Image (cartoon, helix red, strand yellow):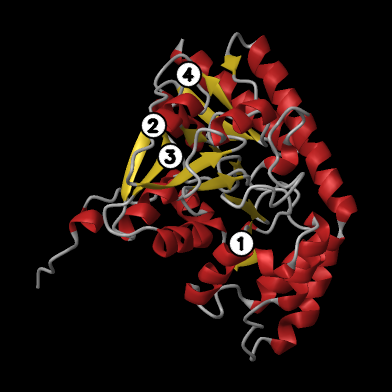
Amino acid sequence: MKFKTSRSIAGIKPYEAGKPLTELFREYNIHSTVKLASNENPLGFSTTVHAAVLKSLSGMNRYPEPAAHDLCCALAQKYRVEPENIVLGNGSDDLIALLAHAFLDPGDEALMPLPSFLMYEISVKTAKGVPVMVPLDGFDTNLCAIAQNISPHTRMVFVTNPFNPTGSIISRDAFQEFAAKIPSDVLIVVDEAYMEFVRNPDVFNSLEKPLQDPRIVTLRTFSKAYGLAGFRIGYGIMDKEAARILNRIRQPFNVNGLAQTAAKAALADQVFLEHSIDVIHQGVDFLTAELSAMGLKPLPTQANFLMVDVKTDATEIFHKLLGQGVIVRSMKSYGFDSFLRVNAGIFSENQAFITALKNVLKSDA
């Protein structure tokens, strides 16, 4: 039977996640890999998280707490807000979809950079909204162009800071100038998935002084710096009325019990977080130095990844690196035909990537 599909759904380009390691082992006949493609924490998660999760396993025959009271209180204390300002999601993707469905009517517009996280576009389209894509200014979010594309139909704006995949940031001054141009009835969704890694003190960090602007919805995640990607848990901090609306429509058990336990334990382990950030910074600095010494051009980055111009077809290099057991990401689908994105790993992983890339580029010479 051929089903009639909504026009907005039919036009969606599926999100392509990285291949599972087991599939790569079979396809390339390799027995071990270095995975630097998904911006994950190479250290895993802390022993505090491990112990807390093991302790809670015996209770997994029960439904999780719908409101995740303890976790929301811990987040509220960390960011100096109220628990009523917080919405939890099954990853940030869940929150993006909730925002689109809560605040977009059919035909309403949501502005976003091009390229950017594909779930912005997918969520807007599934809510019957209209995504308006605004090309980057080089490797930076073009805030001026986004503001210029505001129309009477605009209800939402997405900005990512630091920006994925380029690693660039929006400064405090630039954001304030941008926000002044956005109408009072337009939500500004600031996705700060990589904020923990930023070293530039001039960055706009929406949680330095949270809730100063009721239009701003901040999205954060436990997937990156905290190492909980597999648990799938993110959170939004926003005006209480916006949070009340999202909590009204979200699934009652959208964050499972193990994820709640892991996130609360991760928040309490500041030592592990700081160690993770230090390892990432060392890795980014090592990769930047080594790639530059090879005559390549890594972009400056404030995230846990960087983009590098390999001066040839990036997808071909990506596949050849796979053959050597190194997984990175080709940026060709983002419009950066000769760029790879690689996240910082532990030292041995970073070395393995550099060695493999040298071998691949040498064989192409």
Name the mark nearer the viewer: 1 or 2: 2
Disc 3, SS: strand
**From the viewer's perspective, is 327 left or right of 7?**
right
Q: Residue at x 68, y 59 (%)?
A: 228
The disc label shown at residue 230, or none: 1
- The disc, 2 or 3, on the residue closer to the chain's N-terminal end is 3
Q: Amino acid at mark 2?
A: Val
Q: Nearer the viewer, mark 1 or mark 4?
A: 4
- What is the spatial separation of the Cα atoms under label 3 and label 1, in whole angstroms? 27 Å
Instruction: Farthest residue to the right: give it.
Output: 271
Which callout, 3 or 1, points at the residue further toward the start of the chain? 3
Q: Are marks 2 and 3 in contact (CB under 8 Å)?
A: yes
| Label whose residue precedes the other's in the sequence (1 or 2) | 2
Residue at 55% in and 39% down: 160
Kindly identify which residue carries mark 2: 134
Q: Amino acid at mark 1?
A: Gly
Residue 297 sits in which quadrant?
top right
Q: CA distance from mark 1 to mark 4?
A: 33 Å
Q: Residues within 10 Å of mark 3 (few under 14, many from 20)?
A: many
Above or below 122: residue 50:
below
* Lower sequence index among marks 3 and 4: 3
Task: Please name whichever residue, 310 or 243, is drawn nearer the observer in this view of the structure.
Answer: 243
Residue depth check, mark 3 versus mark 4: number of the one nearer the observer:
3
State the SS at label 1: helix
- Helix, strand or loop at label 2? It is strand
Q: Which residue is mark 4?
A: 138
Q: Are circles 3 and 4 on residues that touch, CB within 8 Å?
A: no
Look at the numbered disc 4 and give the secondary structure of its residue. Answer: loop
